[in-house]
């Protein structure tokens, strides 16, 4: 894995405030993959009474970021350049799972995919992220 950043997240030394605010949890991560869960409900709703797309995007972005973080070497960090998400069905109240996988890891760029499903396996959303690897001066302070 080679990522001290990922290990610090897993151990709890680093705790992303967004995870607490939105209420998602990391279940697993290793070798370019991660899995998160979230109990979605009324506190996540938009004015139409369904889970807000931005909440689903944040869940997917976090899972994809963690999957990509597992590919980082010593002295490397990354930043997300782009996220695209397709919303496939409304969510009212459900346990959601975000499963992310790195599909390409180059020297400077990576592509990550994530499916968000309900507990019964129904696909809620699919997201894709482009990540940029940062090294040296660009990685400092990140």
Image: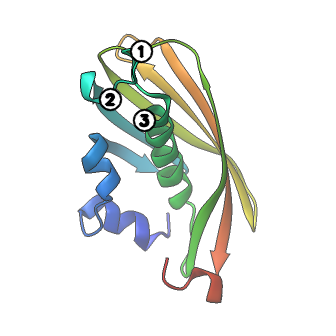
Between circles 2 and 1, the one closer to the viewer is 1
Bin the neighbour count of mark 3 within 10 Å (Cα to Cα): few under 14, some 14-19, many 20 and up. some
Horizontal and vertical percent position of residue 47: 39, 20
Say which residue appears at 52% left-offset and 53% top-offset: 65
- Find out whether the residues at labels 3 and 1 contact each other: C-beta distance under 8 Å: no
Bin the neighbour count of mark 1 within 10 Å (Cα to Cα): few under 14, some 14-19, many 20 and up. few
Report the disc number at residue 126: none
- Locate residue 72 relative to residue 48 in the image: left or right: right
Q: Secondary structure at mark 2?
A: helix
Horizontal and vertical percent position of residue 8: 33, 68
Looking at the image, residue 22 lies above or below residue 118: below
Q: Work out whether residue 16 or residue 67 is closer to the camera in this orientation and state it.
A: 16
- Locate residue 117 relative to residue 18 in the image: left or right: right
Horizontal and vertical percent position of residue 80: 62, 57
Q: Work out whether residue 47 or residue 124 is closer to the camera in this orientation and state it.
A: 47
- Write down the residue under mark 3: 55
Say which residue appears at 49% left-offset and 63% top-offset: 1
- Write down the residue under mark 2: 44
Say which residue appears at 43% left-offset and 27% top-offset: 52
Between circles 3 and 1, the one closer to the viewer is 1
Say which residue appears at 45% left-offset and 21% top-offset: 117
Mark 3 vs mark 2: which is more N-terminal?
A: 2
- Find out whether the residues at labels 3 and 2 contact each other: C-beta distance under 8 Å: yes
- Write down the residue under mark 1: 48
Spatial separation of the CA atoms under disc 3 and disc 2: 7 Å
Horizontal and vertical percent position of residue 54: 48, 36
Q: Secondary structure at mark 1?
A: loop
Spatial separation of the CA atoms under disc 3 and disc 1: 14 Å
């Amino acid at each position: 894995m080679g990522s001290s950043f990922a290990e610090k997240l897993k151990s709890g030394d680093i705790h992303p405030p967004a995870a607490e605010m939105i209420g998602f949890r990391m279940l697993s991560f290793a070798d370019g993959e991660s899995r998160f869960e979230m109990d979605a409900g009324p506190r996540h709703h938009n004015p139409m009474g369904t889970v807000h797309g931005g909440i689903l995007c944040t869940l997917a972005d976090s899972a994809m970021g963690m999957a990509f973080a597992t590919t980082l070497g010593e002295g490397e960090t990354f930043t997300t350049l782009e996220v695209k998400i397709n919303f496939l069905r409304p969510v009212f109240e459900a346990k959601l799972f975000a499963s992310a996988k790195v599909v390409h890891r180059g020297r400077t760029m990576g592509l990550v995919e994530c499916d968000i499903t309900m507990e019964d396996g129904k696909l809620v959303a699919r997201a894709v992220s482009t990540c940029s690897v940062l090294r040296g001066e660009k990685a400092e302070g990140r």
